[in-house]
Image (spheres, grey):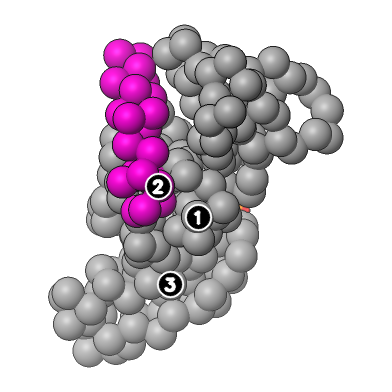
Amino acid sequence: MEELLQVALPKGRLGKKVYGMFESAGFSCSGVMDDTRKLIFENEDTGICFFWVKPSDVAIYVERGAADIGVVGKDILMEYKPEIFELLDLNVGKCKMVVAGKKDFRDKTDRTLRVATKFTNVAKDYYGKQCRDIDIIKLNGSIELAPILDLSDVIVDLVETGTTLKENDLEPLETVAPVSARLVANRSAFQFKNEKIEKIISGLRRQI
Ligand code: PRP
């Protein structure tokens, strides 16, 4: 019996959409979409084992080889720079990494800029390239509060519809990078399970 290909899917709305793409590509697996607490699903016929992981953990599973392939946001790849192969832009989960602040915010370049974010490495890279001195304030959520309460001058965060910024009287000031979901692979799995992975790539490519 051939070894199953281990596929890490990001739990949540994006994961469901992505699993739908696998299904349409001919890699379905019963139970994956059931509303249960079960995390791991095997299909001997297609030779694939799917499991649900926290979106920000997908790259860890893939990098360490617990998953052969997975789907992860470009934001996570930019932040953690895992040593994995990025194979395909799935063109879903599209949003933007932006710098945002209060509408009347004007940067005073002689002062250190206070930046609140979950994405500390992305922010450091972005401002590093501009040789801009920043003070990073690492937060874990509700980032939009930071400029309102004067915890920071700006935030670096993801914007999808723009509703969160708008409802908090903030606006995007600069675009850092476009973000979308990417198919990724463990480096050695890509070599040793190449045939199967290539089949998945071409199946998914047809769904884009
Ligand atoms: C994300 C992001 C923004 C929001 C953007 O937060 O950090 O806050 O979504 O979406 P929008 O432009 O469509 O309003 P998430 O919901 O993941 O929660 P968090 O604030 O706790 O990170």
Q: Earlier in the sequence, mark 3 or mark 1?
A: 1
Q: Is residue 181 magenta?
A: no
Disc 3 target residue: 120
Asked if the residue at tag 1 contacts the one at tag 3, i.e. Cβ–Cβ closer than 8 Å, the answer is: no
Task: Give above or below for 30 relative to 165.
Answer: above
Chain-order first, disc 3 or disc 2: 3
Q: Image quadrant for the C terminus?
A: top left
Q: Are marks 1 and 2 in contact (CB under 8 Å)?
A: yes
User: Please, what is the three-letter code of the amino acid marked with disc 1?
Assistant: Gly
| Residue at x 30% of width, y 14% of height | 206
CA–CA distance in space, label 1 to label 2: 7 Å
Which residue type does callout 2 highlight? Answer: Ala
Q: Reply above or below: 126 against 134.
A: above
Residue 89 visible? The answer is: no
Q: Nearer the viewer, residue 47 or 183?
A: 47
Q: Crowding at label 1, few (<14), some or many (≥20) Cα neighbours within 10 Å?
A: some
Counting from the top left corner in percent of width and height, residue 59 is at 48, 54
| Range of residues picked out in magenta | 185-208
Q: Is mark 3 within 8 Å of ligand 1?
A: no
Which element carries disc 3, helix, strand or loop?
Answer: helix
Which numbered disc, 1 or 2, marks the residue that appears first in the sequence?
1
Q: Which residue is mark 1?
A: 65
Residue at the image point whose x is 56% and y is 52% from the top:
66
Kindly identify which residue carries mark 2: 189
| Residue at image point 80% right, 34% down | 38
Q: CA separation, marks 3 and 2?
A: 30 Å
